[in-house]
Amino acid sequence: MKKILPVEELARDSRFVRARIEDAISDPRQAKVSERNTGSARLEPARPAAADRARQLMHGIFVGEIQALEGAGRTTFDFDDDEIPFQLKLDMARQCWDESRHCEISVKLSEHMGSEIGEFTEATFLYEAACAPDALLRLTGVNRALEGLAIDVFNTMKEFGDVSGDPVLAACEDWMLADEVTHVKMGSDWLRRLTENDPERRERALEFQRTVDKLFSLGGFRGETDENPIQLARKFREMAGFSTEEIDDLSEVATEAQEEARAAADALHGVASGD
Amino acid sequence: MTASGAPRPAFAPWDRRELPGLFGVVESARRVGNYKWIEMRLFEALGGWVATVPELDVKFVLGRQCYHHAWHAELWNKRLPELREMNTERLTEPPNEEMVKFVDAVRDPEAPELTIEKLVGVYRVLIPRKVAAYTFHMNATSRITDAPTIRSLGFILQDEMEDWREGEMLLQSLIQTPEEVERASRRQQALEDLIRSAGGITGPGTLGNPEGQADEAAEGVSVG
């Protein structure tokens, strides 16, 4: 088995349909969608499409968990004993078990919510960050950026379970949220330990994290206003080792991503209407 | 109730533990180093394979069991300094080159259609060999002097037996045609031959040496 498995070789059964996130974002129909004013973008049960959106989000969580499982697994294998510390390999193996449980929970929750594997597409950007050749980039890109996003997503879903009267959803999301805080903390701790005497390397890793964070703010997907379906979970991020300054920075990144998406949508609208 | 101050034997009548075991500190440490090495190679392989198997149930089991073997490696890593090996990396090694060839062969399959070959290597060859080596160690070492190793062996063997059963059930559900039976058999035979050459998880003498047991016991007395 070779080291570093490219994203194209991720093994899936016939139910999975792969999609590129760039295609979804640049889909010209998005311009029409963005014209609609449907009020708050938050995931709230009163919205007519809330159940569909929750199912879609759940499917997104499921495929994200598979890729997180695969990424953690590859980190145990891709690096020799002299390349990363023994204890880091153990942590990644532990994360493998956690992500495996999250996959199982997600499959059962999807069924509980009336969805099924393959109902929505799978984008592979999580694994792409998880197979970076430098282990430190994996820790910042996956454990801090993407698992950080998972904190935000799980907290949002947990709140949705609470307000929509679904205790099964709320309880399961809360369990997964606890694991994600652990994973992000793991990433924060290893970032500090591996770059203790190398501030330049730390800065490069954090820059990669910012890039991933921006990508995963997904044009307004995450933020702190009513326009963002996924809300930044400040309290849990602090528990996971993020400083207030880092969370403020992330909030700014999310705002920037949203403004850029709005400008892109305006441009697309201009093209579509011939202006 | 006994009278106050009345002497009782140090060992209850049903406590039949004896001194010494078949091997002493040095031999025990050597074996523990081999155990840590094989557990590491195994958890790495299971972790690496997760992305290469399309079957969801297999994918999730590999992810779960990856951690089991990592935890075993961690237990052995903690035991080594207690056996006077302060540089734990020094003894974290295979028993011989043949074992390296065996492990390389076990970890070799990558393609998504090779799930049977991956699982046969782990569940029909490697884990049974580990169960045998661990059981021998538990039965052969002193239950008094080497009790910390035995405690870890107990936890680990419980994992190994459960994981073995789960893996075997996955295999039985995957092997559906005569051709797949043939594939599984061929794979098992090739790997058995390699680990036979290696002599087992800790090399020749993994399961003891009937002719040499008296010598090993003597070493246990002198070292232990």
Image (cartoon, grey):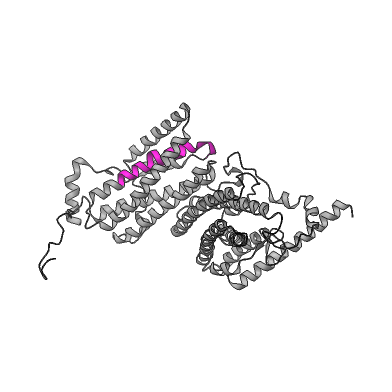
Q: Residue furthest bottom?
A: A244
Residue A56 or residue B63, whichever sits in front:
A56
The answer to whether residue B101 is visible is: no
Residue A19 image point, x, y percent: 67, 46
Q: Residue at x 47, y 54 (%)?
A: A93
Q: Is residue B63 above or below residue A182?
A: above
Q: Is residue A145 visible?
A: yes
Q: Residue furthest top?
A: B178
Residue A10 in the image, given as x and y percentages of width and height: 58, 44
Q: Quadrant of the C terminus of chain B?
A: bottom left
* Residue placed most toward the observer, A212 or B24: A212
Which residues, given as a range, are shown in magenta? Answer: B109-133
Question: Is A180 left or right of A25, judged from the image as shown?
Answer: left
Residue B149 lies, in percent from the top left, at: 29, 55
Total number of numbered labels?
0
Residue B19 in picture, x, y percent from top left: 17, 55
Residue situated furthest right in the rendering: A275
| B112 inside magenta stretch | yes
Q: Is residue A14 left or right of residue A1?
A: right
Q: Report the predominant secondary structure element of the magenta stretch.
A: helix
Question: Is A139 rendered above or below residue B139?
Answer: below
